[in-house]
Amino acid sequence: MNKNNFQNHVEAHSRVEKKLKCHICSTKFALQSSLKRHLVKCGNEKTNCDQCGKEVSFRFLLEHMQREHMGMLSPCKKCGKVFKWRQQLKRHLAAEHKDATNN
């Protein structure tokens, strides 16, 4: 591929409409494969929470904000005990309400 062909190739890709959007950082992509490759990196990158300064991965930033700063907790529907993390609720249900579901 010569220089002129390469320039045409690059320009053709830059004109492609980027319809696919990263749900973590909102970067847009034209190709699904590019988005997938990006998500591996973006999901593992760390950032600091604007509210408390804690370092968290982009992947868990929304969950961190909801749990730590918005008061979104997981209550047990059987006994009313409240848990900060859904995994804690699941362990509680398995230990305390073995035969019951949390519905």
Image: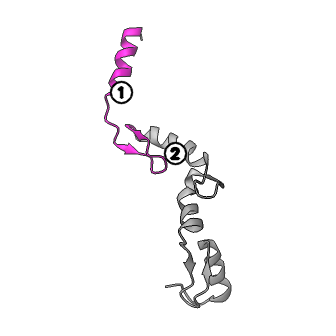
Queried whether the magenta region covers residue 9, the answer comes back as yes
Kindly identify the residue that appears in the image at 63 percent across and 58 percent down: 52
| Residue 13 place in picture, x, y as percent | 36, 27
The picture quadrant where one finds residue 67 is: bottom right
Q: What amino acid is at disc 2?
A: Leu
Q: Does dot 2 land on a helix, a strand or a loop?
A: helix
Queried whether the magenta region covers residue 39, the answer comes back as no
Measure how far apart labels 2 and 1 are at the Cα level.
Answer: 20 Å
Q: Callout 2: 10 Å neighbours few (<14), some, many (20+)? A: some
Which one is nearer the viewer's eye here, 100 or 25?
Answer: 25
Label count reads: 2
Q: Quadrant of the N terminus?
A: top left
Which range is magenta?
A: 2-31
Whichever of callouts 2 and 1 sits on the residue coming sooner in the sequence is: 1
- Give residue 14's mark: 1
62 versus 96 height, above or below: above
Q: Does dot 1 land on a helix, a strand or a loop?
A: helix
| Residue 18 place in picture, x, y as percent | 35, 38
| Residue 63 place in picture, x, y as percent | 55, 62
Q: What amino acid is at disc 1?
A: Ser
- Give residue 39's mark: 2
Kindly identify the residue that appears in the image at 37 percent across and 9 percent down: 4
Residue 19 located left or right of residue 53: left
| Residue 54 place in picture, x, y as percent | 66, 55
28 versus 86 height, above or below: above
50 versus 18 height, above or below: below
Whether pointer 2 and pointer 1 mark residues with C-beta atoms closer than 8 Å, the reply is no
